[in-house]
């Protein structure tokens, strides 16, 4: 799996550039009442492993419909999650399986 550059946001963590992508539309499961969505992160200049940040909150589009508070994902949260994933063994330059991590609240 790779992160599309179109629609991705750029973030620099410890001098390394990453691309992260927030899902524009919620999945069918999110509309069925199940909460959560996944933010994908990949090093910008390398087609290595993808970091999948799982967020337990409702997607903003679903939250509006259900009347839940809309909580945004801040770049500082994504940067903290990237640092944590690297400490836990994520190697963004090496091809391989996706690395999953819960997004800190």
Image (spheres, helix red, strand yellow):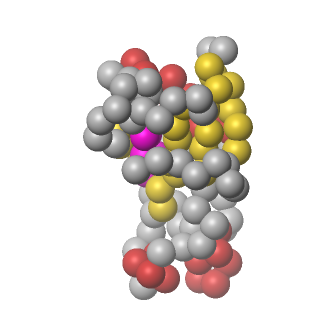
| Number of numbered discs visible in the structure rendering | 0
Image height of 57 relative to 3, above or below: below
Quadrant of the snapshot with the C terminus: top right
Report if residue 84 is visible in the image.
Answer: no
| Front one among 22 and 54 | 22
Q: Quadrant of residue 77?
A: top right
Report if residue 14 is visible in the image.
Answer: yes
Estimate the x, y position of residue 79 in percent, counting from the top left.
60, 30
Estimate the x, y position of residue 37 in percent, counting from the top left.
48, 61
Estimate the x, y position of residue 94 in percent, counting from the top left.
36, 26
Looking at the image, which residue sits at the far left? 97
Give, as a single range, the part of the protein colored magenta: 50-55
Looking at the image, which residue sits at the far top? 15
86 left or right of 23 in image = left
Image height of 48 relative to 34, above or below: above
Estimate the x, y position of residue 28 in percent, counting from the top left.
44, 81
User: Residue 17 lies in magenta, yes or no?
Assistant: no
Which residue is pictured at 59% across the width and 29% down the height? 45
| Front one among 83 and 104 | 83
Which residue is pictured at 40% across the width and 18% down the height? 87
Which residue is pictured at 62% across the width and 20% down the height? 16
Which residue is pictured at 66% across the width and 15% down the height? 15
Predominant SS of the magenta segment:
strand
């Amino acid at each position: 799996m790779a992160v599309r550059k179109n629609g991705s946001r750029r973030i620099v963590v410890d001098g390394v550039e990453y691309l992260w992508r927030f899902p524009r539309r919620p999945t069918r499961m999110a509309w069925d009442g199940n909460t959560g969505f996944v933010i994908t992160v990949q090093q910008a200049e390398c087609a290595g492993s993808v970091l999948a940040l799982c967020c337990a909150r409702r997607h903003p589009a679903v939250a509006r419909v259900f009347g839940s508070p809309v909580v945004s994902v801040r770049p500082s949260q994504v940067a903290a999650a990237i640092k944590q994933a690297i400490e836990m063994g994520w190697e963004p330059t090496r091809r391989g399986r996706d690395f999953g991590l819960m997004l800190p609240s």
